[in-house]
Image (tube, grey):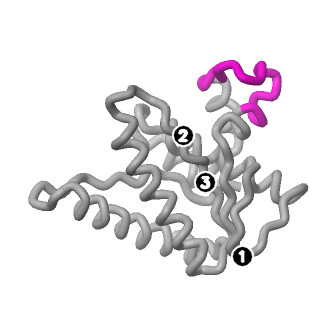
């Protein structure tokens, strides 16, 4: 079940150089996510695999940010003795919409419509407080989490610091 849902945003600090500011923001992510892991007594972390698509002019910046975030997740998993599961985007998307043709673009409206059925209670309320333009990030997390929970329950066994590729 989805127990919490949101989008973690952090704005750059103007007086810091770019790399110092990225380190500051990564530390904020680590604090927030570490607290979340403790609060919900998580036994594993599932995250979407790094994908460096998007406009060519933004790929370096997006790739850098994604890699820093993945480093934060890997560090949290290691320090807290948790399993870390990496789920490629197309793997969980095609699991949600199995009738989609492999290799073809997935219709995100259909994907997100199906994912919303897993979001209830507080998480459902939280989803609707997120700006529509950023709901895709929260719903991506729902897709990854639901896929990982179902796959782990049936097929995947991980040690405390291993990463699995679905």
Look at 35% across and 67% down and name the residue there: 28
Sequence-first disc among 1 and 2: 2
Look at 89% across and 56% down and name the residue there: 155
How far apart marks 1 and 3 lie (CA) works out to 16 Å
Q: Give the labeled residue for mark 1.
A: 160
Q: Give the labeled residue for mark 3.
A: 47
The single residue placed furthest to the left in the displayed view is 15
How far apart marks 1 and 2 lie (CA) works out to 25 Å
How far apart marks 2 and 3 lie (CA) works out to 12 Å
Look at 49% across and 63% down and name the residue there: 71
Q: Residue 151: x and y, percent?
A: 82, 52
Quarter residue 140 falls in: top right
Is 62 one of the magenta-colored residues?
no
User: Helix or strand or loop: what does disc 3 sit on?
Assistant: strand
Q: Is residue 10 above or below residue 36?
A: above
Magenta region: 94-109
Q: Give the labeled residue for mark 2.
A: 51
Disc 2 crowd, CA 10 A, few/some/many (<14, 14-19, 20+): few
Relative to 112, 24 lies left or right: left
Question: So how many labels did they put on this image?
Answer: 3
Disc 1 crowd, CA 10 A, few/some/many (<14, 14-19, 20+): some
């Amino acid at each position: 079940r989805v127990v919490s849902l949101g989008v973690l945003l952090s704005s750059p600090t103007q007086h810091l150089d770019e790399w110092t500011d990225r380190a500051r923001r990564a530390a904020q992510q680590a604090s927030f996510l570490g607290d979340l892991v403790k609060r919900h007594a998580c036994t594993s972390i599932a995250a979407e695999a790094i994908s460096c698509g998007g406009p060519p002019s933004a790929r370096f910046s997006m790739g850098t940010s994604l890699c820093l975030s993945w480093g934060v997740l890997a560090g949290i998993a290691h320090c807290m003795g948790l399993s870390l599961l990496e789920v490629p985007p197309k793997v969980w998307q095609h699991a949600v919409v199995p009738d989609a043709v492999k290799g073809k673009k997935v219709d995100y409206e259909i994907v997100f419509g199906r994912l919303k059925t897993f979001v209830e209670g507080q998480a459902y309320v939280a989803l609707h407080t997120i700006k529509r333009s950023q709901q895709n990030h929260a719903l991506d997390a729902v897709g990854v989490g639901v896929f990982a929970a179902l796959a782990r329950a049936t097929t995947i066994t991980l040690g405390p610091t291993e990463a699995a590729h679905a």
